[in-house]
Image (spheres, rainbow, N blue to C red):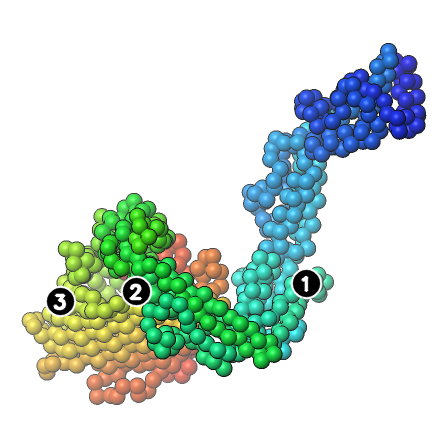
Amino acid sequence: MLKKILLTLCLLLVATFAAAEGFKVSDVLIEGNDRIETSSILAAVSIKPGDQVTLEDIDQAMQSIFRLGRFDDISAELTEIQGAKLITFVVHELPLVRDILFDGNEEITDEKLHTYVSVKIPELYNHAKVKASVREIEKAYDEEGYRATKIDPQLNVDEKNEAVLTFKIEEGQKVLVDSIRFQGNRSVAEDELQDGIETKERWWLSWITGRGAYQDETMRIDLERIKAIYQDKGYMDVKIRQPQLELIKEDKYLDVLIEVDEGIQYRLGKLDIQGDLLRSKEELLPLVSLKPGDVFNRSKLHDSILRLTDLYSDHGYANVNISPLTSKNSEAQTISLNLDIEQGVKVFVEKIKISGNTKTRDKVIRREIPLVEGEQYSASKIKEANRRLRNLGYFEEVNLTTAPGSAVDQTVLNVDVTEQATGTFSVGAGYSSVDKLILQGSVTQNNFLGRGYKLNFSAAYSSRSQTFSLGLTDPYFLDSDWTVGMDAYKTERRYDSYDQFRTGGSLRAGHSIGKYSKAFLSYRYEQQEYQGVDLGVSSRFFGNRTVSSVTGEIVRNSTDYHPDPSRGGMSNFSLEYAGLIGTENFLKAIVEHRQFYPLFWKTVFTIHGKVGYVVPTSGRTVSITERFFLGGIRTMRGFETFELGPKEGTVFIGGEKMAYFNFEYTFPIIKSLGLKGLLFYDTGNAWLGGEGFFTDMRNSVGAGIRWNSPLGPLRLEWGYNLAPRDNEKQSVFEFSIGSAF
């Protein structure tokens, strides 16, 4: 043994002098490995028994072993035994990671953090993977706004060379954007640039909404948005530099500086269209929004190309290609534009393939597609099909794509849908400020039997009301364009001055009269009974009555997405005549319209108006049930429910005329939850027959919250009466939760 040690020391001492000449190796050995096969290590070593090697060769061999990523220490020993020179590589294996823990994390759960760690268990400790995992965790915290987070990976190794990897996390405080500044923006105001990007400065509700968080990916897209703003103003050479970030105010907030190099502004020079012209230039050029001399606008160019593409696509040219050929003249600051059109061949729909509909029948989907097999391709009809299928409310996702058909002039329209629940069964409780506690049960199916039938049965009970209703509607009766439905109902409601009992039903039929419109004709039969009438109220409004009426109605809905519109409008006009049989004789007209306007930051401005007029067609007074009552969360907020309008003594008797208007501004609070905030202004009133419309208009303002909660729609709204009168409250707070029947 002593001889071996001495030989080793001597060889190491003379190795430097022998390095130039090298020496012949008799064998190569590996020591210290436990989990890694010796053969795997030797395969990485280029030195073989019998080779003439130098110290440089040994060093390269050690580096090759280290690159395996399995060891944290490697040494080489040169020994001579009976004249044979041996090289022994002594390795120390990295520990085996048996568990991964997190310490100090509160904002991100362990489960989510595990998804960012590339180290798997059991696995040998890997420096590169741990370093990459730290970067991913830091990135996750950056996305949440914690930009000062510190992560320290710690390894606890036992005597078996097995380890627990713990990521020690110091989250620090959430860093929100305090200010977004721009430099070099001479032609575009800072406010306009800030409005055009998704990254926002913090505000007083950031602790709820999360507004002000800085995300690298969002900012990357925001830089493109800024560029687009400038290019819409003719600055086609604009350059947007990467933002400069600085922690300020004791590292609590972030200052963002974005530098802009605007360049010069271009105007449109010559404008021309060439290639396969479907119509004359004189007819096609008006479809181009840009005109010679206008400031060059990228969005207008894009929209113009889309209009031309839709024109050609609606004539069957599904593969039309429109190339904008531009020629820039920096000295004249103009851009000449030539739209080159290659129409391709006319395409026909060879087949419509429907997939994903596990419950809904094919015909229910096909009848919403205004295209049939063999028909000429039409882009606008495909867009309309997408809109109509989404608005059914049957599907979570709707995707319409095209694929090549059996020939160059044939295409296959693929309709892929993902079903979603369209029926509900619920037994539970709700609450409203009018009816207090409501016990309710309902069965609703918007796609009954997969045929598109709409079925609903509901019952509700509260201390002031009872409601039972049953309805069934077939939107395509006997596979025609006719809509046929029926309803039956029974309600009991207790007011302060009387009790009302109503039992009735209706039959209705409707037919499309346009792209967005339908006309309906319905018949209603209803029996009314009143009890406990206050002696101070004239009996002419009450008594047992029978209503037999016919109603004509026109309904129009052009909104983009019926369940939650952001643009478009909904209109309704109805004219009801009662007097066929029964005791009631009146004519009632109601006009209603609601218009949605999308604004910045996913906010929506809505205008809603409703005007009604009922007039008796005989000498008898119109019953109190058919009169108009305003007030409450669904009409005029800031006034008690049904307590706005004409009174007799202390009892509200309803109006023969009414009009009210709601102006609403809704904004997202928490997008992922569908939680919205609301600001509103309401104006309106109800009047007797001898009074004029729009006289003595009452006004209120207020705010609220709306949420499609797991328990049903939640509305929480506070209205402020701008001019309260005797016995009226200054403000009214109302809310309702649970399904409304």
Q: Name the residue under label 1.
A: 245
Residue 159 seen in the current view: yes
Task: Say which amino acid is labelled 3.
Answer: Tyr
Which type of secondary structure does the marked residue at label 2 adopt? loop
Q: Name the residue under label 3.
A: 523
Q: Could you classify mark 1 by the number of other residues whose Cα lies within 10 Å: few (under 14), some (14-19), or many (20 or more)?
A: few
User: Compared to 42, does 503 lie above or below?
Assistant: below
Quote the CA–CA distance across marks 1 and 3. 68 Å
**Image quadrant in which the C terminus is located:** bottom left
Which type of secondary structure does the marked residue at label 1 adopt? strand
Tell me residue 156's x, y (percent).
71, 34
The residue positioned 60% from the left and 58% from the top of the image is 216
Q: Which of 260 and 441 is in front in this view?
A: 260
* Residue lying farthest to the top in this orientation: 82
Q: Could you classify mark 3 by the number of other residues whose Cα lies within 10 Å: few (under 14), some (14-19), or many (20 or more)?
A: some
The residue positioned 31% from the left and 68% from the top of the image is 558
